Amino acid sequence: MNPQANLIFIISLLLGTTITISSNHWIMAWTGLEINTLAILPLISKSHHPRAIEAATKYFLTQAAASALVLFSSMTNAWYTGQWDITQLTHPTSSLILTSAIAMKLGLVPFHFWFPEVLQGSPLTTGLLLSTMMKLPPITLLYMTSPSLNPTLLTTLAILSTALGGWMGLNQTQIRKILAFSSISHLGWMAIIIIYNPKLTLINFYLYAMMTATIFLTLNTIKVLKLSTLMTAWTKIPSLNAMLLLTLLSLAGLPPLTGFLPKWLIIQELTKQDMAPAATLISLLSLLSLFFYLRLAYCTTITLPPHTTNHMKQWRTNKPTNITISILTTMSVMLLPISPMILTIV
């Protein structure tokens, strides 16, 4: 793709995200979401492969439907209450429609079917944007409307998302699809707590975005897209592969790594809110996703492929690892000891 065009699309993405997260009026928030959708489409379809075009089409259709629902929800609320302010979403029907719209934008169950397909059809760098930056505006809208949302509906969506995200990721061999189901599972953790403690949702999102960015950038460096090639990629940059193992375990939420922090805080908050059964259930369901993280980790470093493999061994590259990946990897693994400081900042 032309570098100037690429720059325009990236700037438009930043602009759309900034407009949505800083707006008070529903129309401005909707405008930001639309700019975001239109800016990411060329980045999804830039390879001109039929699968990429299909992914862009699916993404456009689902996001257009979700944007229409956001507009419908805000207009219904304005009709009944005379308020266009995002924080004044008080009408129950409007909040129900908005929850469905945001679930569709994020890829929460039962509106999750588009996300693995779109991620599978996108390049790794675009996949990184779809998994992290494109989730920020919808989560911000949920954050601003959290006092008027329906707790039962959100808890149901959250538990279903964690269950299906873990369950459907078990049988995958394509790494981008595994990461898509991982994203759905993490969104379940964010959705269950947003009504009771919205700041925890933001902490969870920031840490999830950091760990996912590390994994996508690492995979992009070693040029790996599926499990079979991941097995032979350890010869390229062994030290990076060893850190990828730790980042995957951190994303799974194992102590003493960074990913344990949001899970620990969310379970603690749910217990305070007398939701111990929900906390137990969501913790047990996260074991499903732990299985496929362990599978990825196993293929990354622990397994040596048989000698009859069809894949050529990769030459070890002497190029230094990107400083961004080094910083992100360190943060993805070692932030748990400074968790009190993180809690005071957010």
Image: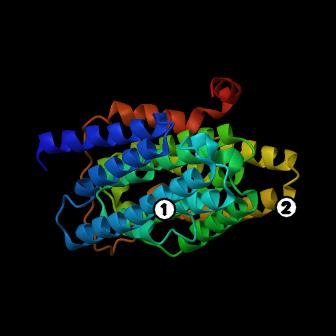
Quick one: 2 or 71, which is closer to the camera?
71
Instruction: Identify the residue shown where x is 51% and y is 55%.
Output: 75
Q: Position of residue 260 (x, y in %)?
A: 67, 44
| Left or right of 283 on screen, residue 141 | left
SS category of the residue bearing label 2: helix
- Which color scheme does this rendered protein use? rainbow
Q: Kindly identify the residue that appears in the image at 43 percent across and 61 percent down.
A: 68
| Residue 197 lies in quadrant | top right
Q: Earlier in the sequence, mark 2 or mark 1?
A: 1
Labels in figure, total: 2
Q: Secondary structure at mark 1?
A: helix
Amino acid on which disc 2 is placed: Pro
- Which residue is depicted at the point 61% across and 65% down? 161
Left-right relation of 217 to 250: left
Residue 277 bears which disc, if any? 2
Q: Which is more toward the observer, 287 or 265?
A: 265
Q: Nearer the viewer, residue 74 or 144?
A: 74
Q: Mark 1 — residue?
A: 69
Question: Residue 126, position in %: x, y?
Answer: 32, 52
Q: Quadrant of the C terminus?
A: top right
State which quadrant residue 333 falls in: top right
